[in-house]
Image: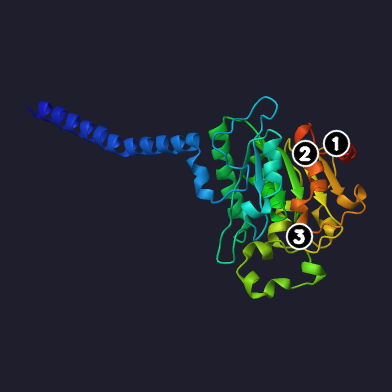
Amino acid sequence: MNKIFQKELFMVKKFTILFLSFLIVTPVLFLGGEKLKAEASGDFLLSEGLPPLGANDPKCIPDETHPDPIVLVPGTFESMDRNWANLAPLLKAEGYCVYSLNYGYTAAGYGTGPIEDSAKELKTFIDNVLAHTGAEKISIVGHSQGGMMPRYYIKFLGGNKVVNDLIGLVPSNHGTKGVIGLNATWTVTDLAACTACRQQETGSEFLEKLNRGNEAPGNVSYTVVTTRNDEVVVPYTSSFLKESKNVVNITLQDYYPLNQTEHQLIAYDVNAFSFVFDALAHKGPADPARSVALFK
């Protein structure tokens, strides 16, 4: 009888463990399925807010000519709808599937939170875009912080596996000495809560970590486009990355001498866009001479 009792007790315990496992695993599987369903439907795009015209269309399907979705990353204090009002519809008209996000929101505004956290938001967004479109790779166009922050994603969060191109318009790659060359500009009230602003100062701990070793890792093509009139990233050459076969640094006035675009307006500048389109259309970074010929 004792052996029979022990056997029955064992069976009860086994059934209890299996039942509890079912209760735990089933919701996880269900929620995972709901997450995949949301990614497939494109519902995740709704949480990003108002997109620029031409971006975040859940019905867009990448084709053989334009297989890589384009992710537009705005700069500090910028919302995607404002920062990419010009470029997004042009990319869409060219046949690209275009996506954008808002990130790093704090009391100081968009793009002001810790850059490490913003890079994690970018990773989640890109993971969702890839799951939604079925694409294997993406390309990124970023303005200011939006051209630098993705490098953290590429270098530390696995982005090197999925990014084809990173095109930065006046990216703060090596920081800034301050607006209009003045130091200690982050003491203004609206900047006091901006962690990302302090992290973009030349010599910050964040930038030292980001730029230590290889500045342009992975099988990624890096195109940097800057302007001599940049009054935010000072000096303007601090946007540049160390040149290599996968890195090209371009100064707008070297190819368009009369162009007086500064930091903010470069995100709306058709001359700057010539380098963007060239980089996206060809393997490797932009070829400046080919880019200019494209728009003549």
- Give, as a three-letter code, the residue at label 3: Gly
Where 258 sits versus 186, above or below?
A: above
Residue occupied by mark 3: 175
In the picture as drawn, the residue positioned furthest to the left comes out as 1
Mark 1: give few (<14), some (14-19) or many (20+) Cα within 10 Å. Answer: few
Circle nearer the N terminus (2, 3):
3
- Give, as a three-letter code, the residue at label 2: Phe
What residue do we see at 78% from left, 61% from top?
Answer: 233
Answer whether labels 2 and 3 touch (C-beta < 8 Å): no
Task: Please identify the quarter of the rendering in which residue 77 is found.
Answer: bottom right
The picture places residue 119, in percent across and down from the top left corner, at 61, 50
Identify the element where label 3 is drawn.
loop
Task: Please identify the quarter of the rendering in which residue 112 is found.
Answer: bottom right
- Give, as a three-letter code, the residue at label 1: Leu
Quadrant where the image shows the N terminus: top left
Residue occupied by mark 2: 277
Mark 3: give few (<14), some (14-19) or many (20+) Cα within 10 Å. Answer: many
Residue 160 lies left or right of residue 227; in this view the side is: left
In front of the other: 31 or 219: 31
Answer whether labels 2 and 1 touch (C-beta < 8 Å): yes
Distance in Å between CA atoms under marks 2 and 3: 26 Å
